[in-house]
Image: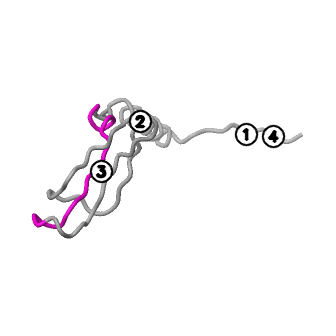
């Protein structure tokens, strides 16, 4: 008959695992909720390289999908931007 061995964890490994679980729980519970403005915003924000607003370098869009906005984006976010509201 085969001999059964008992599974035992190294005490240091067990403490490290407990610490990771506690940190994961804290990260989930303390993470900031998305702001209300970000979830209800619909439209297109276009980012430009400079104040002449000629070279488009990025885009963020909140598209109306059944009046809940889905986010889309590409490129670079700069201080030079325009925003066009979309009707949900």
Q: Which residues are magenta?
A: 36-52
Q: Residue at x 21, y 70 (%)?
A: 55
Disc 1 is placed on an element classified as loop
Q: Nearer the viewer, mark 1 or mark 2?
A: 2
Mark 1 crowd level (few <14, some 14–19, many ≥20, 10 Å Cα) = few
Q: Are marks 4 and 1 in contact (CB under 8 Å)?
A: yes
Spatial separation of the CA atoms under disc 1 and disc 3 = 63 Å
In percent of width and height, residue 62 lies at: 35, 46
Report, in whole angstroms, how far the alpha carbon at label 3 lies from the one at label 4: 67 Å
Quarter of the image for the C terminus: give it. Answer: top left
Q: Among all residues in the image, which is located at the extreme right? A: 1
- Within-10-Å neighbours for mark 3: few <14, some 14–19, many 20+: some
Query: Circle 3 sits in a helix, a strand or a loop, which is it?
Result: strand
> Which residue is under mark 1?
5
The residue carrying pointer 4 sits among few (fewer than 14), some (14 to 19) or many (20 or more) residues within 10 Å by Cα, namely few
Q: Position of residue 32 (x, y in %)?
A: 30, 34
Q: Earlier in the sequence, mark 3 or mark 2?
A: 3
Residue that mark 2 sits on: 68
Look at the numbered discs 3 and 2 and tell me whether their residues touch, using CB distance below 8 Å: no
Q: State the residue in front, 49 or 14.
A: 49
- Residue 44 badge: 3
Closer to viewer: mark 1 or mark 3: 3
The disc at residue 3 is 4
Q: CA distance from mark 4 to mark 1?
A: 6 Å
> Nearer the N terminus, badge 1 or badge 2?
1
Tag 1 near tag 2, CB within 8 Å = no
Marked residue nearer the N-terminal end (1 or 3) = 1
62 up-or-down from 82: above or below: above
């Amino acid at each position: 008959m085969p001999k059964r061995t008992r599974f035992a964890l190294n005490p240091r490994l067990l403490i490290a695992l407990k610490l990771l679980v506690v940190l994961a729980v804290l990260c989930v519970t303390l993470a900031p909720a998305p702001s209300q403005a970000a979830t209800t915003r619909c439209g297109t924000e276009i980012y430009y390289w400079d104040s002449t607003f000629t070279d488009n370098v990025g885009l963020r869009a909140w598209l109306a999908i059944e009046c809940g906005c889905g986010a889309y984006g590409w490129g670079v976010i700069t201080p030079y931007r325009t925003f066009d509201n979309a009707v949900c």
